[in-house]
Image: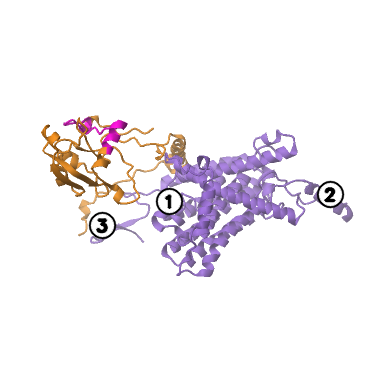
Chain colours: A orange, B purple
Amino acid sequence: MPIPESQVRWVEAPRLGLWEQLYLPAVVEGLKTTVRHLFSPKVTEEYPEQEPKLPPNYRGVHRLNRDEKGRVKCVACYMCATACPAHCIDIVAAPAPPEWQADGREKYPETFVIDELRCIYCGMCEEACPVDAIELTTLYDLTGYTREELIFDKEKLLSVYDYTVQAGTDPIRTQAGRLGPASEPATFRRPTHS
Amino acid sequence: MPVFDPTTTAILIVVLLAGALGLAGYLVLSERKIAAWIQDRKGPNRVGPGGLFQPIADGVKMFLKEEVIPAHVDKVFYLLAPIVSVSTALLALAVIPIGPTTPPPPPLPIPSGATPAQLVDQLQRQQAEYQQQTSFVLAPGLDVGILYVFALGSLAVYGVILAGWSSNSKYSLLGCLRASAQIVSYEIPLGLAVLGVILMTGSLNLETIIARQTEHGPYWFILFQPLALLLFMISLYAEDNRLPFDLAEAEQELVGGYHTEYSSMKLGLMLLAEYVHLVISSFLVTVVFLGGWSLFGLEALLGDTALTAGLKVCILCGKMLFLVLFAQVIRWTIPRFRFDQLMNLAWKVLIPLGLLNLACVMVVLQWGLPWVTLTGTSLLLLVGAGYLSTRWQGSVSVPRRKVVPLPPGLPPGVTFAPQH
C-alpha cells in the first residue's frame, strides 16, 4: 500500500552557510571535543584492585539471617521456595528443638539449600519471607571451580550472614520488619565514580 | 656518505627496519591508548609499567596464533599478498630522510672559456666536498626521491587487491574493491598537491626540498602551500586507509575488510604494513611541507656537529610523531565517510582544487611574483570552494537537478526522478 502523496510531508534540511561548507571549523570543533576527552578524568574501574561501588540495594549472594540468640531465623514456611521463579531453593522442614519451642518456634529448616547457579537474583524470596530470614547481600564476586561448590547449604548461607555482619555490609532493603531506605526512589543514589 | 659501502648500508638497513617495525608496534599501543583516552577509558595497562610492553605481548600473540590457510583461497596470491604489502611499505623507507641531510650539488655551470680538464677537476672537487657531508638517508642523493615513494605507494594497492581477490570471500572482495577504487582516486589529488611544491623547488629530491625550505630561514612550504598541505593530508589518510576513509576495512559492514581471511603473522604483517605507511606518509608531510629537520633556527643553537645531528634527528622524528598522533586523534574526531561521499570528495573537490592550486603556482613562477601570493591564492581557493558549494547545494524543494514527479504506486520514498 503506497503512501498517498497528500500524506507525505517534506522536511527541509537546513541550508549550510559558508562557515559550515568550509568544514574546517567543524573539524576544529570536533578536535576540541576529542582533545578535551583525551585529558579528562577516566571512568575505568580496574576491577580486581578497585572494588566497584554498588548501590546498597544490589542483589547478590543470599544470606540466612540469625535471630538474637544466634539461631537461624527461618521458620521453614516454604514461602520463598514457592515464590522462587527459578526453583532454586530446597528446604526440608523439621520440628524445632524443644528449647526453641519455648520461644514459640514450631518448625525450623533441617536443610536449606540454594543453587546459586540457578538463581536469577530477582529478590522474590526476600519479598516473600514473613520473618526477614532470607536476604540478598551486596556480595557479587561468586566464583567456584565446580558446580557443586556453588550449591549453598544452610551453614554456608549462615556464614554469609556472619561475614556480611562482620564486614558491615548489611543489605538495607529490609531491616527488622520494615522497608529500608532503598525502597524509596527519592533516596536512591547512583554510585558515583571516582 | 654518498660513497656506497655494502657493510655500512646493510647495518643501516637493519637499523632502519628494526626501528620502523618497533615504531609500528608502539604506534599500535599509542593508537589503543589514544582511543581509550578519548573514550574516557584507561587503555591497555597490564603488561609492564603503564602497558609499555603491550606491543611485545601483541607480537608474541601474533606469532603463537594458529596459522590458518582456508581451503577456498588461491594459495599463491594469498601468500603473496602480505609479502607485497610489507615489502612495498618498507622499501619506501629507503629515500626518506630521518635526520640532517645535504642536498646533492647542483649541475656545474660550464663557462665558455673552461677546458675539459678544469671542468673535470671542478666536478671532482665538488663531489669530494659532497661526500664529506653526512646525510641520514639510506639512499642519499636519489634524484627521483618523491616519485619513488609515490610509485611504491601505488604498488601497495596490489597487496590489498591480491589479498581481497585471492581470499575468495565476499567481505574480502568488497573490501579490496573499495580500497582499490579509493586509492586510485586519491592518488591524483595526492600527486597534484605535491606537484606545486616540486615546481617551486625544481627538484624531486627530498633532501633538496628540505634545503630549499631552510636555506633562507624557516620558509616552510606550509606557509606558501597551505591548501596543498590540506589536500595532501586528506589524500594521505585515504591512501593509508585511515579513518575517516577506512571503508576498505569497515568492521561494521565488512567484518575485517580485505584481510578477513588472514590469520596469525600474515594478518600481523598486513596491519604492520598499514602502520609503516602511516609513518612514511608522516615523514613525507614533514619533509615536503614542514621544513624537515629545521625548527625556527633552534637546530643551529648547538655548534657541535654530532649533537646537532642528534637534535635534527629528534626534531624531524618529533614532527613525524606529532603527525602520526594527530592522525590518531582525527580518527576519533571525524566519522567515516559514505562511499559516494568519498568519491565526491576526491573527484569534485580535491582534484579541481589541486588543479587550480597548481595553476596558481605556475602563474606565480612564470611571472616571478612573490611566493606570498600563493598563500593568498590558497585561502582564496578554499573560501571560493566553500562559497560555490553553498550556491550549488540542493534541497528537497529546490533540487540541484531538474526532477519530475513519478506516477504513484512505487515504493515509499521513490517520488522523483531526474529529468532527462
Same chain for marks 1 and 2?
yes
Horizontally, is A135 left or right of B191 in the view? left
Please say if B91 is above or below A75.
below
Q: Position of residue B20 (x, y in %)?
A: 60, 50
Q: Residues within 10 Å of mark 1 (few under 14, many from 20)?
A: some
In the image, the segment drawn in magenta is A159-185
Determine the CA span between mark 2 and mark 3. Answer: 80 Å
Q: Which residue is mark 2?
A: B125
In primary-sequence order, the first of circles 1 and 2 is 2
Q: Quadrant of the C terminus of chain A?
A: top left
Out of A19 and B285, give the one closest to the viewer: B285
| Chain ID, mark 2 | B
Name the residue rendered at 42%, 47% in the picture.
B335
Other-residue count near label 2 (Cα within 10 Å), few / some / many at <14 / 14–19 / ≥20: few
Q: Residue A67 location, x and y as percent?
A: 19, 32
Q: What residue is disc 1 on?
A: B337
Residue of label 3: B412
Task: Name the foreground residue: A178 vs A78.
Answer: A78
SS state under label 2 = helix
| Distance from the alpha carbon under mark 1 to that under mark 2 | 56 Å
- Left or right: residue A23 compared with residue A106: right
**For residue B263: magenta?**
no
